[in-house]
Amino acid sequence: MTTDRQPLALPKGQHKVLLHSCCAPCSGEVMEAMQASGIDFTIFFYNPNIHPRKEYELRKNENIRFAEKFGIPFVDADYDKDHWFARAKGMENEPERGIRCSMCFDMRFERTALYAHEHDFPVITSSLGISRWKNMQQINDCGQRAAEKYPDLLYWDYNWRKAGGSARMIEISKREQFYQQEYCGCAYSLRDTNQHREQNGRAPIRLGVMYYGQEAADQKR
Ligand code: SF4
């Protein structure tokens, strides 16, 4: 495990946190950083945005595989995709980082906050912000909004990209050979990514094919 990290501290002296995880590559560094600081955490996997089901299962199972490796509790929440599509209605053609994404983050944080409230977690956070493709302020606003619904709940807005976090995220993903998703997650991001690829003469995305570190592994064979 990577060790060159600064010790982390939860807000207001708390020691237990519910970590919303979007996928193994994004949460790998977050999980290892928390473990290195002795933070008691549980993973909450609630991502009804991911489409289709095959991709959802791939991403979830990679996350479970890594959690089991370190004995981290993993909460497998609902795949209530019909609810997600209902909330996305009218936003089908919004660009990434727009209002559809705010809805998507809100929905995931709302369920995380509810679970935290019902199961005595004083703090919530998410791996969503570690990706450089995401707008961190947008994510933090959504996380804060969800936590504010409960007087006993705090949202931890730690910037997982800093102090080498982004580099370690890639390093861990390669070491663990995590499944490498090629689009954000929803049906509309899959459509838009494929359109962009087509415009640039690239083949459409094939689900379940790309894994981090695969090239290096192939070269060793
Ligand atoms: S692009 Fe990503 S964040 Fe935005 S709505 Fe789709 S899955 Fe959610």
Image (cartoon, rainbow, N blue to C red):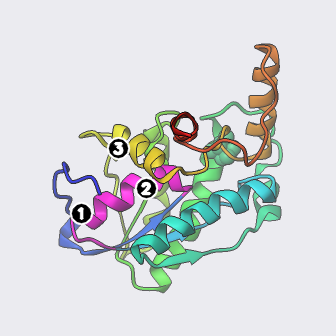
Residue 191, position as x, y percentages in the image: 81, 35
SS at badge 2: helix
Q: How would you rate the neighbour count of disc 3 (Cα within 10 Å): few for under 14, some for 14-19, many for 20 or more?
A: many
Front residue (pair 1, 202):
1
Give the residue number, with chain letter if any, for mark 2. 28
Which quarter holds ligand 1? top right
Relative height, residue 47 to residue 139 (above, below): below
Residue 168 is marked as 3
Q: How would you rate the neighbour count of disc 2 (Cα within 10 Å): few for under 14, some for 14-19, many for 20 or more?
A: many
- Specify whether tag 1 is near ligand 1 (CB below 8 Å): no
Q: Quadrant of residue 137?
A: top left
Marks 3 and 2, how far apart at CA: 9 Å
As shown in the figure, which amino acid type bears the numbered disc 3? Arg
Marks 2 and 1, how far apart at CA: 12 Å
Residue drawn at the location 20% of the way across and 68% of the way down: 12
The overriding secondary structure of the stretch rendered in magenta is helix
Q: Earlier in the sequence, mark 3 or mark 1?
A: 1
Front residue (pair 150, 47):
47
Give the residue number, with chain letter if any, for mark 1. 36
Residue 80, position as x, y percentages in the image: 76, 68
- The answer to the question of whether label 3 and label 2 lie on touching residues, with beta carbons closer than 8 A, is no
- Is residue 32 something that shows in the picture? yes
As shown in the figure, which amino acid type bears the numbered disc 1? Ala
Residue drawn at the location 63% of the way across and 74% of the way down: 77
